[in-house]
């Protein structure tokens, strides 16, 4: 029997407890479970060899009794090299090799803000069922739709499934379909074009081929802005407390291909980002005594914990804090024709003669960042400052609030802000808002106030 011969020739690759007959039987059961078939005997032999190699990896890892287990899934007939090529577009170099075109945006955590000990957006109706990107490097599109779906659900109370195919085929804003893309680019594209519902533009690129953009559906949801999260797990935690967050991680380890359950805690996983996923919560596994992030993947529900993975928190596991972002608002799109497949130009910066601290909606100056603070609504353009660099004094017309070097990121970077209502309590909100000019308002923060713009 062909399978017995192949299995016998590879018996040294797996645990001694399995005979060649048992390996063949296990492979046949796995084939049936996942409805697998192969075009030729040679293809099936290759698949069996990969299955046996993965059996060895699973058995040896699980014998160590670590905080996570490996197991068979629909990808068990692939070597790691084949899996990476077919399901990760060979790794997505855009995550680490593409500079951001958009004005920089930073979400930071307000000092002293009370953040819940655990959050799970899957139980709050803000996460759609796990999807499967297939043999297409479209992880970036699934990460994007996940965070937009979450933002729209939280804003509207309605959970809708959005179209990854709309992004894969139509978003040419620096994104490359099945060959990779960036979530920030996709957010920017959705901000300009909106995005269709999944049912109106279903996913069809799972075979690995990017098709041609279709114009038959109307945009259902749009985003009003988006922000990057400071490279800090406390800042990420504060962001996930608000809504699901798109992230990029390094997933080029066999532990990802075969992950089954538990909290992934693997020091070999680095920060060469190559895969887009979605953080949907965080918490603590009391049995393992490990804090974790709950992450939604796009490899189907047979992978991992019903399509999810828990990753250890506090160790920057697989670069989880390096490239996080999320929409700052989502709403129903206005009726319009189908999306244009043309590229979107980068957001313009205002002329250098314009004052500092203006509304980011018009673009921030080149020496400013767009800042949002967890627990404070709105955002604003903010220059850097330090002990040796004072905050610029030029403020928008009508602003009487004073610039102060008042904010600090988790990395120690300091930023200026317009501080309003210097009293211990904002008693007269109208008077306090007047300090911020005509388009901003004074928000309470740590006993004083800070001017932000609400779009």
Image (cartoon, helix red, strand yellow):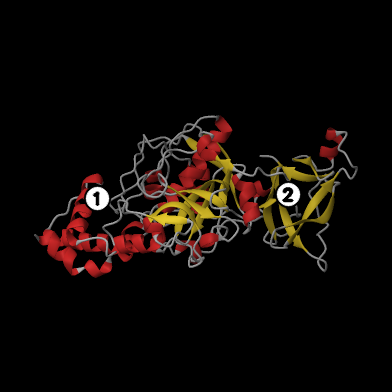
Quarter occupied by the N terminus: bottom left
Determine crowd level at label 1: few under 14, some 14-19, many 20+ residues with C-alpha closer than 10 A. Answer: some
Judge from the rendering whether residue 392 lies leftward or rightward of residue 149; answer left or right. right
- x then y, percent, for residue 370: 67, 53
Counting labels gives: 2
- Residue 3's place in the image compared with 165, above or below, is below
Question: Which label sits on residue 110?
Answer: 2
Q: Residue at x 73, y 49 (%)?
A: 110
> What SS does tag 1 mark?
helix
- x then y, percent, for residue 51: 26, 59
Residue farthest toward the right in the current orientation of the protein: 423
Q: In which quarter of the image is residue 165?
A: top left
The residue indicated by pointer 1 is 30
Residue 57 is at least partly visible in this image: yes
Q: Quadrant of residue 180?
A: bottom left
Residue farthest toward the front in the current orientation of the protein: 17
Mark whose residue sits in front, 2 or 1: 1
Q: Earlier in the sequence, mark 2 or mark 1?
A: 1
- x then y, percent, for residue 199: 36, 34
């Amino acid at each position: 029997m062909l399978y017995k011969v192949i299995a016998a020739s590879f018996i040294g690759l797996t645990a001694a407890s399995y005979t060649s007959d048992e390996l063949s039987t296990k492979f046949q059961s796995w084939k049936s479970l996942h409805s697998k078939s192969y075009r030729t005997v040679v293809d099936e032999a290759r698949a069996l060899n990969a299955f046996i190699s993965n059996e060895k990896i699973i058995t040896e890892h699980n014998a160590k009794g670590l905080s996570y287990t490996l197991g068979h899934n629909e990808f068990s007939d692939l070597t790691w090299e084949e899996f990476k090529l077919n399901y990760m577009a060979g790794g997505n170099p855009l995550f680490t090799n593409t500079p951001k075109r958009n004005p920089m945006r930073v979400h930071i955590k307000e000092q002293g803000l009370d953040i819940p000990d655990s959050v799970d957006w899957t139980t709050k109706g803000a996460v759609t069922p796990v999807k499967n990107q297939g043999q297409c490097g479209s992880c970036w599109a699934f990460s994007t739709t996940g965070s937009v779906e979450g933002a729209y659900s939280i804003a509207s109370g309605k959970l809708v499934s959005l179209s990854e195919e709309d992004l894969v085929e139509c978003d040419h804003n620096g994104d490359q379909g099945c060959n990779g893309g960036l979530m920030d680019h996709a957010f920017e594209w959705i901000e300009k074009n909106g995005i269709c519902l999944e049912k109106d533009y279903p996913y069809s690129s799972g075979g690995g081929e990017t098709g041609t953009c279709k114009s038959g559906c109307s945009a259902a949801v749009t985003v009003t802005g988006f922000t990057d999260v400071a490279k800090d797990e406390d800042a990420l935690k504060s962001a996930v407390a608000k809504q699901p967050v798109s992230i990029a991680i390094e997933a080029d380890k066999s532990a990802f291909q075969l992950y089954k359950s538990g909290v992934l805690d693997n020091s070999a996983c680095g920060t060469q980002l190559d895969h887009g996923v979605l953080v949907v919560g965080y918490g603590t596994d009391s049995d393992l005594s490990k804090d974790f992030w709950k992450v939604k993947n796009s490899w189907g529900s047979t992978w991992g914990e019903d399509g999810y993975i828990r990753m250890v928190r506090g160790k920057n596991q697989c670069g989880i804090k390096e490239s996080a972002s999320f929409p700052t608002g989502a709403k129903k799109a206005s009726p319009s024709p189908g999306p244009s497949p043309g590229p979107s130009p980068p957001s313009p910066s205002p002329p250098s003669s314009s004052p500092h601290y203006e509304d980011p909606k018009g673009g921030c100056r080149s020496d400013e960042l767009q800042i949002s603070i967890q627990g404070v609504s709105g955002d604003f353009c903010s220059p850097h400052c330090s002990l040796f660099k004072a905050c610029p004094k030029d403020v928008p017309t009508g602003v009487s609030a004073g610039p102060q070097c008042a904010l600090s990121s988790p990395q120690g970077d300091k930023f200026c802000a317009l501080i309003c209502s210097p009293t211990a309590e904002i008693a007269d909100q109208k008077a306090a808002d007047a300090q911020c000019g005509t388009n901003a308002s004074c928000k309470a923060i740590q006993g004083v106030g800070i001017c932000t713009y609400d779009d």
